[in-house]
Amino acid sequence: MKPEHPSPEPDVPGADDPDARGTPVGRRVLLGTLGLGALGLAAAPSLQRGLESFLAGAADRDPTGLTGLLPNGGGFRYYSVAASVPRKDARTYRLTVDGLVDRPASYTLADLKALPQTRLVRDVQCVTGWRVPGTPFEGVRLSRLLDAAGVRPAARAVRFTCFDGTYSESLTLGQARRADVLVALRMRDEDIGHGHGGPARLYVAPMYFYKSAKWLSGITITEDVEPGYWEVRGYDVDAWVGRSNGRDDAPTS
């Protein structure tokens, strides 16, 4: 997956069929998508989201990654690092918390929704340059889950894994405890859909979006920071917006 911001996002939805593998996007679909991109669509929010949804579906069937290069009227771009991603729902989703903790836990989606929710409205900044302003996210503060697990004194970092089977990320324990780091369940005042990493994803407000891992399935407390998927490929481990990766973007916080 190319950085989308990455999950990078990267932001890539999985196939309609959970067992399906990506196939090349059809010629007519690709040409039609290119035409839409060329218009530069400064569209109303409803039209913008419709275009995002269309691009998400096309990207999910485009192993070339070309759809991720298309203009999208100021909205989210879609990329993937996995050939396909299984779909999870309220019945099948689980988030585990383990590692250097006294009380390992497994949360259902209902468990997470029952916890106090925090709402943040920040710009989303991709390390590749695009930004989506004023994006609401809502979910459980990661610090609450860490406190409930009872982090042991030897812990210094947190590793995140995803049910795409490929993506991973890490934060220092201090970064993970920030009030603006969430296990997000809602985005833009809607439940997070599969294409944006639902039903639950990480949201690290002050960092480039590749830190906000999609399809979150595991939180493991560790002794040391383990570089994530994009970081072993050259991205900065500390990904503060405007202060890393050689970029000077305006901060998102």
Image: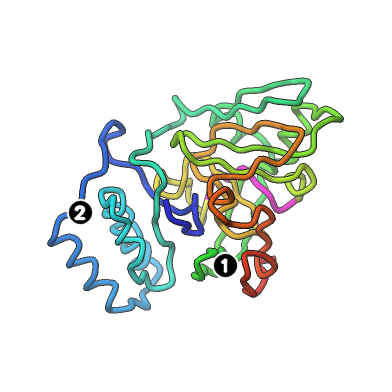
Q: Is residue 97 magenta?
A: no
C-alpha distance separating marks 2 and 1: 32 Å
- Residue at 73% across, 32% down: 222
> What is the count of numbered marks?
2
What amino acid type should be assigned to the residue bearing mark 1? Gly
Q: Amino acid at mark 2?
A: Val
As displayed, is residue 55 above or below residue 40?
A: above
Residue 172 in the image: x percent, y percent?
75, 45
| Residue position marked by numbered label 1 in the rendering | 134
Answer with the quarter of the image where residue 107 lies: top right
The residue under the point 62% across, 61% down is: 121
> Where does the magenta region start and end?
179-186
Res 148 → quadrant: top right
Of callouts 2 and 1, which one flags the residue occurring earlier in the amino acid sequence?
A: 2
Residue shown at 33% from the left, 68% from the top: 70
Residue under label 2: 25
Q: Position of residue 106 (x, y in %)?
A: 61, 23
Q: Secondary structure at mark 2?
A: loop
Taking depth in this image into account, of 80 and 106 the one nearest to the observer is 80
Residue at point 27% right, 77% down? 38
Q: Label 1 neighbourhood size at 10 Å, few (<14), some (14-19), many (20+)?
A: few
Residue 151 lies, in percent from the top left, at 80, 30
Of circles 2 and 1, the one toward us is 2
Q: Going by the image, does 171 lie left or right of 37?
A: right
